[in-house]
Image: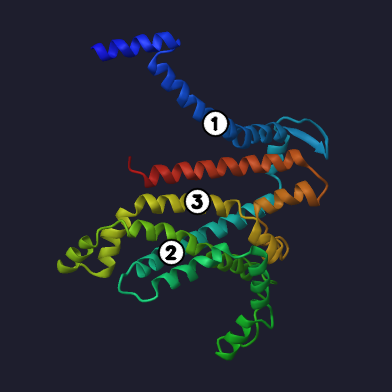
Amino acid sequence: MIHTTIEKIKSYKNGFSINTKHKLIGWFFVIPGALLIFSFYFYPIIRAFILSLQGGVGNNLRFAGLFNYKRLLQDGLFKQSMFNVFIYLILQVPIMLSLALILAGILNDRTLKFRSFFRTAIFVPCATSLVSYAIIFRSMFALDGFINTILMNLNILAEPINWLGGPWTARLLIVIGLTWRWTGYNMIFYLAGLQNIDPAIYEAAKIDGASAFDRLTKITIPILKPIILLTTIMSTNGTLQIFDETQNLTSGGPANATLSVSQYIYRLSFEYVPRFGYAAAIAFVVFIIVAVLSFMQLKVGDER
């Protein structure tokens, strides 16, 4: 009682109560971060939406209402780019995350020799220069490249495949490149989660006669569910906004068969006659799609 009274007297002398000072200090730390988030995240979103309501070429923009959004429904190139990114999403994300989970389970084995080496080797592609690996991939998958040579020497192919010249083979090349580059990145998340699971749980399951598949489906996956949800959302968002691989591996070809939405936005803004309003409308639609898919994944994956 006496201590509280003394504190109140001190606080009144200084002009602010203790609680007020604590709140002011808290806001002092929060406001700079909040301003940065607003300036570099929310403000650009607002500006992009305003820009999407404007039409015209170059800097000669004028208010056009929903004209750009109506144009999207009739734009065959936009539909093609959306089809391409959803093909990447459907094919690549499940393969990559499944492979990452399997590799994490293998490399979590304490009896495995050279574990650190294998972990580093699988993670290195994520840190590799995109331009460097794109050049190597284009060389490997050329008509006279390493892949065709190996497949023909093994009598799997009678003649070389034009990987970069066919629509589906070019898409497959994008999927292979994405999987090679990002599997190790997701593996690190799963590996961190596995290392927090008590090994005694697996030992008890073995004693009870649980197979490796049962341990995976009944122990590993349920415990790693929050991490699996996180990697799924990040992979989905990254794939829908893919730009680097399609630009450097295939340049969007052949005949726009691998063109991504982000690449189309880039072309509308900097390669074709600049139509910033229409490009902003496409970007805003992609933003909404990403937000909706992320929300759906959260609702399905998070039981809370």
Please name the amino acid that badge 3 sits on. Met
Write the residue at 55% across / 63% down.
Answer: 126
Looking at the picture, does residue 236 appear above or below residue 250?
above
Q: Alpha carbon of mark 3 to alpha carbon of mark 2: how far?
A: 14 Å
Q: Alpha carbon of mark 1 to alpha carbon of mark 3: how far?
A: 23 Å
Residue 157 horizontal/vertical position (percent) = 59, 86
Q: Alpha carbon of mark 2 to alpha carbon of mark 1: how far?
A: 35 Å
Write the residue at 56% across / 31% down.
Answer: 32
Q: In the visual, does 83 lie left or right of 76?
A: left
Residue toward you, 116 or 25? 25
| SS of the residue under disc 2 | helix
Badge nearest the viewer, 1 or 3: 1
How crowded is the residue under tag 3: few (<14 C-alpha within 10 Å), some, or many (20+)?
few
Q: Which mark is residue 131?
A: none
Residue toward you, 152 or 21? 21
What is the number of callouts on the image?
Answer: 3
Marks 3 and 2, the one that precedes in the sequence: 2
- The residue identified by callout 3 is 234
Write the residue at 15% across / 68% down.
Answer: 207
Residue 229 horizontal/vertical position (percent) = 41, 50
**Dot 2 and dot 1 residues touching (CB under 8 Å):** no
Residue toward you, 202 or 86? 202
Residue 81 horizontal/vertical position (percent) = 65, 54
Please name the amino acid that badge 2 sits on. Ala
Q: Which mark is residue 100?
A: 2
How crowded is the residue under tag 1: few (<14 C-alpha within 10 Å), some, or many (20+)?
few
Q: Quadrant of residue 68?
A: top right
Marks 2 and 1, the one that precedes in the sequence: 1
| SS of the residue under disc 1 | helix
How crowded is the residue under tag 2: few (<14 C-alpha within 10 Å), some, or many (20+)?
many
- The residue identified by callout 1 is 34
Residue 64 horizontal/vertical position (percent) = 76, 31
